Image: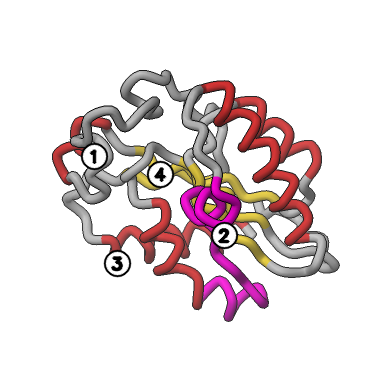
Amino acid sequence: MKKRLNKNKGILFWITGLSGSGKTTLSKKIKNKISKYYGPTIIVSGDDLRKIFNLRGYSYSERLVLNRKFRKFAKFVINQKINLIFAIVGMFHEARSWNKKNIENYVEIYIKSNIKNIIKSNKKKIYKKKGVGDIVGVNIKPELPKKPDIIINNNFKTSMNNLSTQLLKKIRNLI
């Protein structure tokens, strides 16, 4: 079933998954098509916001506080009639529940990846660093999405181009 959109607001594409699962890479690959189909679009990652605002907390409670700020920022952006592709670990039931209740044009996308495959791919190298702190999926148990709008399985055997094509097709079928 197609989602009904409020044409006076942007769309929040909340792309969630473990760190290193391919959220930001997929976001960059779909951005131009999202702009073409749905209007002005920006991409923001959790890493971007951490850099912009010099945020350093990685514990469960610090991540939860940051997540509350991130989703308010997301709502602010889409209320300006700008689409936001938000690539964020954001593995909290509370966040997704709040988004569903408070953001009209909300599309939840889960990039499903096995932690062993992510570590093996070693793209971000965070899983190899010593003393890196709390990592969701390693020493913080993720609260995996129960009913995302879209699931993309990244087993690291399918190219990012093919995964982005799959994702765009699923988005077009949904909205």
Q: What scheme was used to colour the molecule?
A: secondary structure
- Label 1, on which residue? 118
Q: Is residue 50 magenta?
A: yes
Q: Secondary structure at mark 4?
A: strand
Residue 166 sits in quarter = bottom left
Judged left or right of residue 125, residue 68 is right
- Label 2, on which residue? 85
Label whose residue precedes the other's in the sequence (3 or 2): 2
Q: Secondary structure at mark 2?
A: strand
How packed mark 1 is, by other alpha carbons closer than 10 Å (few <14, some 14-19, many 20 or more), is many
Q: CA distance from mark 1 to mark 4?
A: 12 Å
Label whose residue precedes the other's in the sequence (3 or 1): 1
Q: What residue sits 81% from the left and 61% below the top?
A: 79
The location of residue 94, given as percent across then percent down, is 66, 26
The location of residue 11, given as percent across then percent down, is 69, 60
Q: Which residues are magenta?
A: 33-54
Q: Secondary structure at mark 1?
A: helix
Closest to the observer: 153 or 45? 45
- Label 3, on which residue? 161
- Label 4, on which residue? 111
* Amino acid type of the residue tagged 4 in the rendering: Ile
Judged left or right of residue 46, residue 4 is right
